Amino acid sequence: MEDCIFCKIINGDIPSAKIYEDDKVYAFLDLGQVTKGHTLVIPKKHARNMLDLDEETASELYKRVPKIANAVKEAYAADGINILNNNEEIASQTVFHCHVHLIPRYSKNDDFGFKWKDNSNTYSQEEFLKRAAKISALIPS
Ligand code: AMP
Ligand code: ZN
């Protein structure tokens, strides 16, 4: 897609620190290096984000994630790795070509450190089950 920096990276029009490529997927170091080895894995087929991926592209993308993530984790002997993806601006997406972040973790106090808030004391069991049913009803078979 024209005007997409990640499509330009795939096409070799702008440089990247490539770590893996095949016919479906491209992986390269994130310029920001939140932690050492921070990598992005992207489908070669342009999609705005994960919400726009067709099933085949999603499957081709995710089936390669474990082997790439294991290499990223192993390279500098990380103790774990966060694998995540941001969709739309409110969710911190800044580049609108679908990408999966691989962020190796070396310490709880590194530059990625954050903690989920546990809100389990703020709703009833009934409300909890209502949420599940509402979402479930929206998933196409
Ligand atoms: P997100 O905020 O989830 O959309 O992530 C976009 C990521 O792309 C950020 O972590 C940026 O550091 C990274 N990024 C932007 N431009 C480049 C580039 N030319 N090469 C490598 N990483 C990039
Ligand atoms: Zn693109």
Image (cartoon, rainbow, N blue to C red):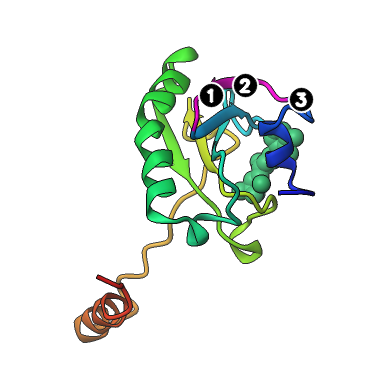
Any atom of ligand 1 within 8 Å of the CB at mark 3? yes
Circle 2: element type: strand
Q: Is residue 32 visible?
A: no
21 and 38: which is toward the camera? 21
**Residue at 48% across, 13% down:** 75
**Residue at 69% across, 50% down:** 95
How busy is the neighbourhood of tag 1: few (under 14 within 10 Å), some, or many (20 plus)? some
Q: Amino acid at mark 2?
A: Lys
Q: Is residue 88 visible?
A: yes
Q: CA distance from mark 2 to mark 3?
A: 9 Å
Picture quadrant where residue 63 is located: top left
**Residue at 48% across, 55% down:** 53
Q: Are marks 2 and 1 in contact (CB under 8 Å)?
A: yes
From this view, report whether residue 59 is shown above or below residue 54: above
Picture quadrant where residue 5 is located: top right
Q: Residue 36 appears at what percent x and percent y?
A: 59, 23
Is 50 a magenta residue? no
How busy is the neighbourhood of tag 2: few (under 14 within 10 Å), some, or many (20 plus)? some
The residue wearing badge 3 is: 15
Residues in magenta? 16-23
Q: Which mark is residue 21?
A: 1
113 and 21: which is toward the camera? 21
